[in-house]
Amino acid sequence: MLFCQCLCSKRTSKKRSLWNNLSAIINSDGESCWFVFGDFNAVCLPEERLGSVFFHNSVYHFNNFIHSIGLLEIKMGGRRFTYMSKAGDKHSKLDRFLVSPNVVELWPNLSVTALPRVHFDHCATLLSSNQFDFGPSPFRFFKYWLKDPSFDLVLRNGWSVSKLPYSRLHISSLSVTPQNR
């Protein structure tokens, strides 16, 4: 796994130079899992800016960098914009997590959350994976049990054994009625 944190210049020529160098490095090691993240000082779409100028040329080069080496963006939740000017009149999504396709294959449940902006003009971002494997289910249920006339009684007795109030099953008279099919 290779992690690359970016803090891109505001100058288009410096951003393009960084993206070209990153492209060359990533292309030279296509087998690794790449995480490229940080403040790219660029947006991908017009709706990622509010109250500021949208530069088509910069967007073109940034999107070209992302797509030419096959990076994928991890979906971001929490906040729509990651940057806000001091005056609060300009908002942009400048921070993002880009990964190589093999990362998504290994961790399909990756997500990014833009946290509340507290001390800086950018929001902190949190990368997480909600992939849990608790092993095989310890519970089995067979549909033919519903056909047994004593099923309702067995179920009620089984759930009434627990003394914990939150673990009791509340059964209405209709909820455990076998259906003839």
Image: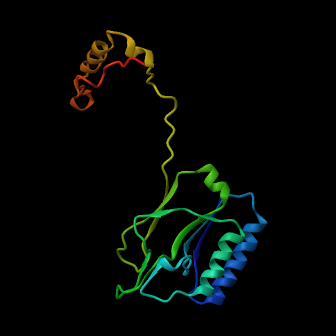
Question: With respect to residue 155, does 81 lie above or below?
Answer: below
Residue 13: quadrant of the picture:
bottom right
Indicate the quadrant containing the C terminus: top left, top right, bottom left or bottom right: top left
Residue 43 shown left or right of residue 164 in the figure: right
Residue 18 position, x and y percent, is: 67, 80
Q: Point out residue 27 in the picture as x, y percentages from the top left corner.
A: 76, 67
The residue sitting at 67% across, 75% down in the picture is 65
Name the residue furthest front: 181
Q: Quadrant of the N terminus?
A: bottom right
Residue reaching furthest to the top: 149
Which residue is drawn at the image coordinates 45% and 25% (left, top)? 138
Above or below, comparing residue 148 to residue 131 in the picture? above
Q: Determine which quarter of the picture holds residue 169.
A: top left
- Left or right side of 54 for 24: right
Give x and y (percent) for residue 162: 25, 22
Question: Looking at the picture, how far across and down is residue 124, in whole percent?
Answer: 44, 70
Q: In this figure, which colouring scheme has been used for the structure?
A: rainbow
- Residue at figure coordinates x 29%, y 25% from the top left: 175
Q: How many marks?
A: 0
Q: Nearer the viewer, residue 17 or 174?
A: 174
